[in-house]
Image: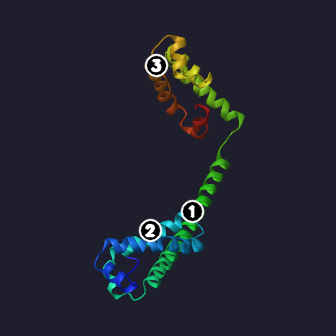
Amino acid sequence: MNQLSEIEILKELASGSTIAFAHVVKTYQERLSLFALHYLNDQETAKDVVQDVFSAVWESHKKFADVKNLSSWLYTMTKNHCLKRIDHLKVKQKHDDVLKYRQLELNKTALNELDTSPLIFDEINVIIEQTLTQLSPQARTIFEMSRFGNKKNKEIAEELNISLKTVEANITKCLKALRPALKNYLPLVIFLLK
């Protein structure tokens, strides 16, 4: 391929020669990557753009019959792909910032409205106590060891000499009973019962 002129390489490409395509990739990949990197400032993005260019070259190889200057055509394609990528990145960046901003605003509003007064924590504790008294002594003990004693399910099973499945079933039963009782306090309860 090295002995062929650019016009001959273009003809081979137009006919669908994989050898000519491989030669073009080998010859231009690093050059186009550096060109794209200069404008995109990100090596992975530059490589992706060049990969997209070569994919487009292969998919439209029949158009090479009309191309007069391979280098110019490849650099123009790379330039256009870079421009598209920059536009995409700008929109994405703007969108990401807007989403981050909105998320922060929502978080701020939620935190402003969240009541963390001692009264609320006292109410939560009363509801938890009342709900746990309605459960079996074993379920209550397992739940308290898990949530308030910070013991792992396996430790609880060994300490109470019961199966791991029994521990898991009792914790699930307790959580099912507590969820409706504490539905008005969910933002706090999620962290308290973890």
Q: Is residue 52 left or right of residue 115?
A: left
Q: Which residue is mark 3?
A: 164
**Farthest-out residue, right:** 118
Q: Which residue is mark 1?
A: 96
Nearer to me, 43 or 185 = 43
**Kind of residue sitting beneath label 1:** Asp
Q: Which residue is mark 2?
A: 51
SS category of the residue bearing label 2: helix
**Kind of residue sitting beneath label 2:** Gln
Residue 63 vs 191, above or below: the answer is: below
Q: Which quadrant would residue 97 be assigned to in this image?
A: bottom right
Gap between marks 1 and 3, in whole Å? 44 Å
SS category of the residue bearing label 3: helix
**Residue at point 41%, 72% (across, down):** 54
**Residue at point 63%, 27% (across, down):** 125
Where, quadrant-wise, is the N terminus in this rendering? bottom left
Q: Residue 183 location in percent, x, y?
A: 53, 37
Residue 184 vs 57, above or below: the answer is: above
Q: Residue 91 location in percent, x, y?
A: 54, 70
Name the mark nearer the viewer: 2 or 3.
2
Q: Which quadrant would residue 9 be assigned to in this image?
A: bottom left
Q: Residue 75 location in percent, x, y?
A: 49, 80
Residue 105 vs 27, above or below: the answer is: above
Gap between marks 1 and 2, in whole Å? 25 Å
Which numbered tag is attached to residue 84? none
Nearer to me, 160 or 86 = 86
Q: Residue 37 location in percent, x, y?
A: 57, 70
